[in-house]
Amino acid sequence: MTRVFPFSAIVGQDEMKQAMVLTAIDPGIGGVLVFGDRGTGKSTAVRALAALLPSIDAVAGCPVNAASEAEIPDWAQVEDRAIVSKPTPVIDLPLGATEDRVVGALDIERALTRGEKAFEPGLLARANRGYLYIDEVNLLEDHIVDLLLDVAQSGENVVEREGLSIRHPARFVLVGSGNPEEGELRPQLLDRFGLSVEVASPNDIDLRVEVIRRRDAFENDHTAFMQHWDAEDSALRARILVARETLKTMKTDDAVLRDCAELCVTLGSDGLRGELTLLRTARALAAFEGADAVTRHHLRSIAASALRHRLRRDPLDEAGSTTRVTRVVEEVLA
Amino acid sequence: MSDANDIWSRAALAVACFSVDPAGLGGIWVRARSGPVRDRLIAGILAGLPPMGLRRLHPNISDEQLFGGVDLGATLSSGKLVRSNGILGAPTAMLLPMAERATAGLSARLALALDAQSGHALIAMDEGAEPDERLAPSLADRVAIHLDLDALAVGDCPVLETDFEAITQARALLPNVQVMPEALDTLTRLSARLGITSLRAPLLALRLARASAALMGETHVDEEDLTLAAELVLAPRATILPQSETAEPEAEPEQPKPDATTDPEDSTEDQSELDMPIPEDILLEAVKAILPTDLLAQLAASKAPRRTVSAGGTGAAKRGNRRGRPLPSRPGTLDGEQRIDMVATLRAAAPWQPVRAKQQPDRIGLHIRPDDIRIRQFEEKSDRLLIFAVDASGSAAMTRLAEAKGAIELLLAEAYARRDQVALISFRGEAAEVLLPPTRSLVQTKRRLGALPGGGGTPLAAGLRAAMELAEQSKGRGMTPSIAVITDGRANVALDGAANRPQAAEDAQTLGRVIRSRDIPALVIDMGNRPQPGLKDLACTMGATYLPLPRADAQRLSTAVSVALDA
């Protein structure tokens, strides 16, 4: 039995935790990219997120987690059509996964045993309505990246191969993590992530000790530790659910829209995805904080996450993108 | 400082601790050539493993072997679905030989398996000959024990005795081992002082200390256990030489420790012997004593003490070695030249099996017809590699090294946009040096380039040779190399390192011819104040474009290179 470290018990790394919570409130934000050194809790956070997320209602036997019977794809032979509450899927996409495994392929088992031509759904199907997690995303093979780009854009997976012609919804939140020193990410894929955060090992010794202490307690005093943190996780889960409701009635002033646009123009980010993400994320944050309208405070808190990976790369600029975003945020929202 | 006997006895202790808690410690990374020393170590590990099984992996292991899948042969012969269990299906120790060859994909999967805490342990046998051929960092970070046995001779290494009874007792004792909170503090602070950023390190060290205490039959982790943990887990990961007893503020955190013993978290058990705080400095000394010697050498040479991060086992090479995107297989005939796509062929044949079996009931096995045959296809797409050979000699440094650096940075930005790879060679003094093996990392290249020092003679021939060798290597990895030589052309150091101007010029010409014969596209950029006729001749010999840039700025240089290389 795999034990999952509770999300609330992760020490520090507030930006990463905030970004993940915000995508849980509004999946439309479109994914989180976590870049940083090894051993900074990237994978721990993603696995913890899986346990934290509220469950979804889905057809029990459906390979794409359809919400209602009507949404079950016609190729799927679903026997158990009851609507049950499932945990939000968080699917791992391992490096070197074949195209077959990612998009799905002819079901060899069925073909061999029953002589039927059937579709075996891949990871993209399983990730529908949930999360797709790619560790070491910067080392992912290019052709898999191409596939992901396409699907993440359209929200639909189309398979035309081996005489199969299949399509199914594949709307998922993409979570990637990696170490920038091992290679960079293609700008196209970078752009598909709504938020990007940079994590580093805490420099503060006391924080580091706290990390080790909690981990040690998790391993050696499991029951007591989980009792405490499960309660915290439940509280956070409840807050996420409330925020989802609040989000529906969130008010956004024209002034905030102007601010978003001005930030993006000043930073010279390509396309309009920057503004849209900025706005959505700020709204999600406002909802999470229980506010009834988006303010500059919200924009300021999430501007770096939403914009730092959308800047034009200037190799001669030694200062990181974070510094540039912070500077511009100070100027524009002064 | 640490002689062979020490290393071996530490290795023996490491193996014993590993046997106590294989899954908790994640595994052992052994850097050693295949030979009797390594065999003895493995024998020791094996003897301590039961009841945990051991499975052998290989660097190119398939997903089906790892995760399990349909057993095609058994399914077909029995007519029922038969699944095979993957290696990761049950808790087991995994022996990975040639660990330095493991692909990024395999490393990621194994890292996932180790992360899951499902009782797997990895024994990585790393035979890397070069310093940058090593186990993938993602795995190295997750296995507790790092051993380097390369320096040992078999005479130094008596056969490991395994006291299995003691190990069994220790395993039973392990859950009861207590660690006082200060020990945890100490290990964390120590790892921070050794420049270890990963927080897995102190955690693994703590587990090792527990295992060591259990092995000694004790229920409390004492100083000895912590020392061992620091030696085995922290020392090999150190990236900076710790400063002890300096006036640096870092030394301060040692002070508050005595108060910490009154921490309410303390168990109510007998604390008399536990109240003694463990001096961090003792641990530090222990670690310093066994720090790898090359770390000292690196520090002395004031190089960045960080390990070459790009060297993810074969990671760097592998990324350059993508054999292109596999296209869907197409029907074809076997002509002995094309490769058959077995799975696709079986897929094509699969749906027809019941029908064909009815037609030919007497035939046993698969019914595969010629029109089922599928042929593999790949779309070749080799990466472009731009090798910069930069003259960093005194004369060049005087003139335009800074401009050359600027130009290279501009080109890097462009290479980044086109997803080209770049490599950096500098030549000065008596020899050339590969500053940066082919990489796509802009960050690293900039860092290396910024640190490029200038001064010394101009060993142009050595620079050309290094560039050529790198180009040949990269061709072997499926890349398409081009060379850009940036020099002021006053070659004055011959290939053998002698300061002999005519010989130096002749050597450069010879290498120029070799480069031409290998058909490597090249570009010679003259950054001297006055164009050198000799350099133009060299460019001619190399079949290279010659670009005199007496008054160029970085931007113009960059434009010129792009134009010349794209032509």
Image (cartoon, coloured by chain):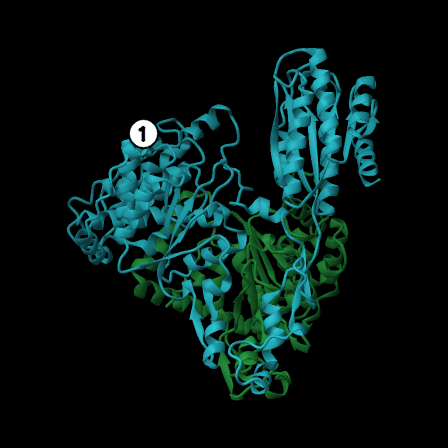
Q: Is residue A307 above or below residue A239?
A: above
Colour displayed for chain B in the image of the structure? cyan
Colour displayed for chain A in the image of the structure? green
Q: Which residue is mark 1?
A: B2
On the picture, is B315 further left or further right than B147? right
Residue B341 in view of the camera = yes
Q: Is residue B6 above or below residue A309?
A: above
The spot of residue B428 in percent (x, y) is 64, 20
**The residue tagged with tag 1: helix, strand or loop?**
loop
Q: Which residue is at the front of the view, B356 or B197? A: B356
Tag 1: amino acid: Ser
Residue drawn at the location 61% of the way across and 31% of the way down: B434
On the rendered image, what quadrant is the C terminus of chain B found in?
top right
The extreme front residue here reads B362
The spot of residue B195 in percent (x, y) is 44, 37
The spot of residue B68 in percent (x, y) is 46, 68
Q: Which residue is at the front of the view, A72 or A302? A: A72
Residue drawn at the location 24% of the way across and 37% of the way down: B158
On the picture, is B557 further left or further right than B448? right
